Amino acid sequence: MSLEKIRVSQQARDQLLTLKRRTKIEHWNVLCRWALCVSLREKTRPRTEGITGDSSVEMTWHTFAGDHEDVYLALIKQRCHADGLPTDINTVSTQFRAHLHRGIAYLVGDRSLKTISDLVSRCLPAP
């Protein structure tokens, strides 16, 4: 498994479509970046079982991460380390996909998300 091509599940695709409608954010990669950050903020490990890449939504790692590839990779590796997991490419890739899918589910479950400001607020620590 690698990070070169990222394909989300059909369920995540449907959830991303809902988020696009709600937030008016047009690009999958932007929503996916927010989803990753939301999941990384959680203290528990995401489920890794049952995540498929059975939808038509596919992007490269570079499209996902943009100019911040090193930052996103470091965030995922740091989270693996904090969770007591190895930081080899297979583990990092599996954890990335798990965090991405969990984050998408969290975002779509928050019906108050309607703007980029709502997303920023969702990712900031509680006062």
Image (tube, helix red, strand yellow):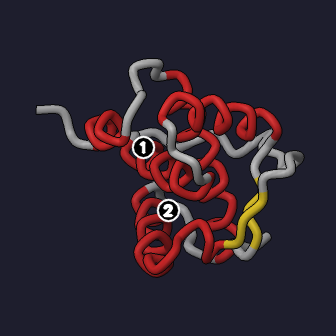
Image spot of residue 27 (x, y percent): 59, 53
Disc 1 element = helix
- Image point (50%, 62%), residue name: 80
Quarter location, residue 118 = top left
**Residue flagged by tag 1: what amino acid is it?**
Val
Dot 2 falls on a residue whose secondary structure is helix
Mark 1 is surrounded, within 10 Å at the Cα level, by few (under 14), some (14 to 19) or many (20 or more) other residues, namely many
* Count of marks placed on residues: 2
Q: Left of 49 or right of it: where is 98?
A: left
- Tag 2: amino acid: Cys
Percent coordinates x, y for residue 56 in the rendering: 86, 51
CB under 8 Å between callouts 2 and 1?
Answer: no
Q: Residue at x 58, y 58 (%)?
A: 29
Say whether residue 127 is left or right of residue 17. Answer: left
Residue 12 or residue 23, whichever sits in front: 23
Q: CA distance from mark 2 to mark 1?
A: 16 Å
**Quarter of the figure with residue 7:** bottom right
Please report whichever mark, 2 or 1, sits nearer to the chain's N-terminal start. 1
Q: Find disc 1 in the rendering and name its residue.
A: 38
State the image coordinates of residue 92 (x, y, percent, origin top left).
61, 67
Q: Looking at the rendered structure, which numbered label has been put on residue 80? A: 2
Nearest the eye: 79 or 85: 79
